[in-house]
Image (tube, rainbow, N blue to C red):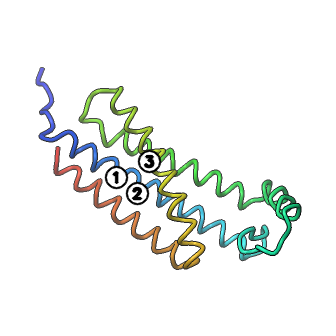
Amino acid sequence: MTRPRPLPDPSHYATRALSGAVLLGTCLIAVATLVVRAEQRRGAAPALLGSADTTRATADSLVAQAAGTLPAGILVTGTFLGLMVAALTAWTALAPIGNIYRRLGLAIVAGFGALVLGMFTTMPLDASFGTPGLVLLVVLTALFGAVQLVRLRALR
């Protein structure tokens, strides 16, 4: 039985795999945010952002009303799917590492990284640039995530 060829630089390989996975998960979270904004423009739920003149009681009632709507479900589901896609992409990309404990730990880190990067990029881009900013985020994260994962094969 032949043993698999060891990776030349496992840390470089893992870094590239994690960055690709995190970017693809962030892309999915940004797509979910785009769909939510489209639903809000269509009138499916009130836009909670941008209403600074409302009182605290009114804001709480708006949040309670919007919690059970379709956009809220889309946002929660899209965020969870982005987290899972990042974790599963990292898990499969890190297969040459061989150590299940390390693969699992890095996959969890990738899922959390996609969640954090998704939150810290979609909210400011949506508030500053609106839909064009979110579309740009989707395109860039999909492009760079795919590039990282394609270049990962060259390291094997």
Identify the element where label 1 is drawn. helix
Numbered tag placed on residue 19 in the rendering? 1
74 on left or right of 54 = left
Residue in view at x 63 percent, y 51 percent: 77
Q: Nearer the viewer, mark 1 or mark 3?
A: 1
Tell me if mark 2 has few (under 14), some (14-19) or many (20+) residues whose alpha carbon lies within 10 angstroms of its own: many
Where is residue 80 shown, x and y percent of the image?
58, 47
11 on left or right of 56 = left
| Location of mark 2 (residue) | 23
Could you say which is closer to the camera, residue 63 or residue 2?
Answer: 63
First reached walking from the N terminus: tag 1 or tag 3: 1
Residue at the extreme top = 1
Q: Amino acid under label 1?
A: Ser
Residue in view at x 70 percent, y 54 percent: 73
Numbered tag placed on residue 86 in the rendering? 3
Spatial CA distance of label 1 from label 3 is 9 Å
Where is residue 94 shown, x and y percent of the image?
30, 39
Residue in view at x 48 percent, y 45 percent: 112
Q: Amino acid under label 3?
A: Ala
Q: Amino acid under label 2?
A: Leu
Query: Compared to 100, does 140 lie above or below?
Result: below
93 on left or right of 88 = left
